[in-house]
Image (cartoon, rainbow, N blue to C red):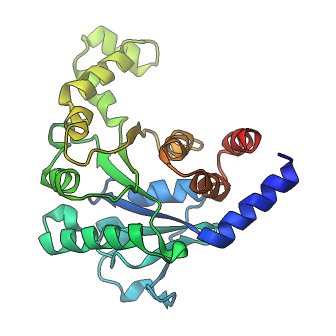
Amino acid sequence: MSTESTSSRFEDIREKFGRFRILIVGRANAGKTTILQKICNTTESPEIYDGKGNKIDPSQLEGSMGRGIHDIENELIFRSNGKFVFHDSQGFEGGRKDEFVRMKTFIADRANTTHLKERLHAIWYCIPMDKIDRAIQRSEEMFFEECDSNNVPVVVLFTKFDALRVKALVKLAPADRRLALQGGLPKIRPLMEEIFNGADAWGRLSKMTYPPKTSVRLENIHKANEGCNILIENTASVLNDEALQMLFVSAQETNIALCIKYTVQR
């Protein structure tokens, strides 16, 4: 397929499906806002629209995106990349059963709607690793045991993975710790993996009634070019429809290699 015909195919898909729509779920301080900013290559806050497309003044909202208190129907769109539309899970992570029910209803409705431009295409569930001993809490159990995502793929994002470096340093002898801090000790990474595997977060999730499709580990997300590519590649890999893969790949603008890969394949 030529570049011109591929570009035309992308445009046809965008005309049919509209923006690529993602629900992002996670506790406060899980890194949700930073992740969306990195994906959209910006440091600005998103513009917020209600379910009817009316722009909302952020000052009128209770709380902030970082605290997850938006109406889940609100659409978050970054001016730097208007090909994505995001929804925030609105705080069920704090144990609010009514918000959990609203989220389940939102997922079911958006997964099955006949209006293609309103469909939900993927869910990113953020679990921070800075408190790995309590990584899987009641909110995760509720979601993966009770929330049938209706064939909308769920990707777990183990955020703040670099926090395990501190825990690994504690396990080292003082001399090795000094070497590790100077970047001269290769033992630190295996120890981080050992701590992560010992918590068995992925093992527990994968055995639940509605397990996630895949997971990614995100670290140093505030650094340039860190974290985005692996998330983009893993999300593309679990989309079960070729048109949705193309919609997602054409929407993201940070991984040019992935665009070329899918263009060649198609």
Q: Quadrant of the C terminus?
A: top right
Is 219 situated left or right of 1 in this image?
A: left
The count of marks equals 0
Residue 94: x and y, percent? 16, 64
Q: Residue at x 38, y 39 (%)?
A: 215
Residue 260, above or below 71: above
Quadrant of residue 143 in the image? Answer: bottom left
**Relative image position of residue 43 (x, y in whole percent):** 55, 62
Q: Is residue 16 left or right of residue 167?
A: right
Q: Which quarter of the image is occupied by the N terminus?
A: top right
Give the residue at x 64% y 71%.
16
Task: Please provide percent x and percent y for residue 62.
Answer: 29, 82
Residue 70 location (% of width, % of height)? 33, 76
Q: Is residue 48 above or below residue 120?
A: below
Kindly identify the residue that appears in the image at 33 percent across and 51 percent down: 126
Residue 98 in which image quadrant = bottom left
Q: Quadrant of residue 69?
A: bottom left
- Is residue 68 shown above or below 141? below
Q: Nearer the viewer, residue 190 or 183?
A: 190
| Residue shown at 34% from the left, 75% from the top | 72
Between 21 and 216, the one nearer to me in the picture: 21
